[in-house]
Image (cartoon, grey):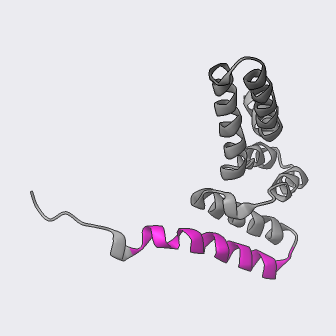
Amino acid sequence: MKLYNILIKYRLYLGLALLAVGGYVNYSASFWPAFPLYLVGVILIAGHFFFGPLRLIQECMENGDMEGAEKILHSIKFPNLLFKPIRSVYYTLRGNMAMIKQDFETAERDIKKGTALMSGRYDAGSIKTSRGC
């Protein structure tokens, strides 16, 4: 699990390095030997922006390290790029961190943002029921 946490923490830089190495291999050999490097690099970079480092927050919160969890939350620069369920968790965690600091206005705003993102998912009108066989 330690290796996975390190991969999550440094996947943006690793993805950029793989793209650079892929560019060099593409220049020195051809495209097809460089293609796996390009593919893995793009997947790592996309994972950084679409999933974020929220997996790292779990370990900090289990250990009671709220400052570390807050530092990881502040490392997310573009929360609107996160997938919708992950963005909901992001705003809910931000609200919880604001509650710990007794900043109730920010906490209420962030928690409302988090619940509003997922409220349409469980809308009663979108649930289909089956009637009989």
Residue at 85%, 54% in the rendered image: 75
Residue 22 placed where, x, y %? 75, 27
Going by the image, does 38 lie left or right of 98?
A: left
Question: For the view shown, which residue lies furthest in the left direction?
Answer: 133
Residue 97 placed where, x, y %? 81, 65
Residue 88 on the magenta span? no
- Identify whether 73 is placed above or below 127: above
Residue 103 on the magenta span? yes
Quarter of the image with the C terminus is: bottom left
- Total numbered labels: 0
Going by the image, does 123 lie left or right of 132?
A: right
Quadrant of res 26: top right
The magenta-colored residue range is 102-123
Name the foreground residue: 14 vs 108.
14
Quarter of the image with the N terminus is: top right
Residue at 68%, 59% in the rendered image: 81
Residue 126 placed where, x, y %? 35, 71
Name the foreground residue: 67 vs 30.
30
- Identify whether 10 is placed above or below 116: above
- Identify whether 114 is placed above or below 106: above
Question: For the view shown, which residue lies furthest in the bottom direction?
Answer: 105
Q: Main secondary structure of the magenta part?
A: helix
Residue 90 placed where, x, y %? 70, 60
Going by the image, does 125 lie left or right of 87?
A: left
Residue at 83%, 67% in the rendered image: 100
Going by the image, does 97 lie left or right of 122?
A: right
Name the foreground residue: 67 vs 88.
88
Quadrant of res 110: bottom right
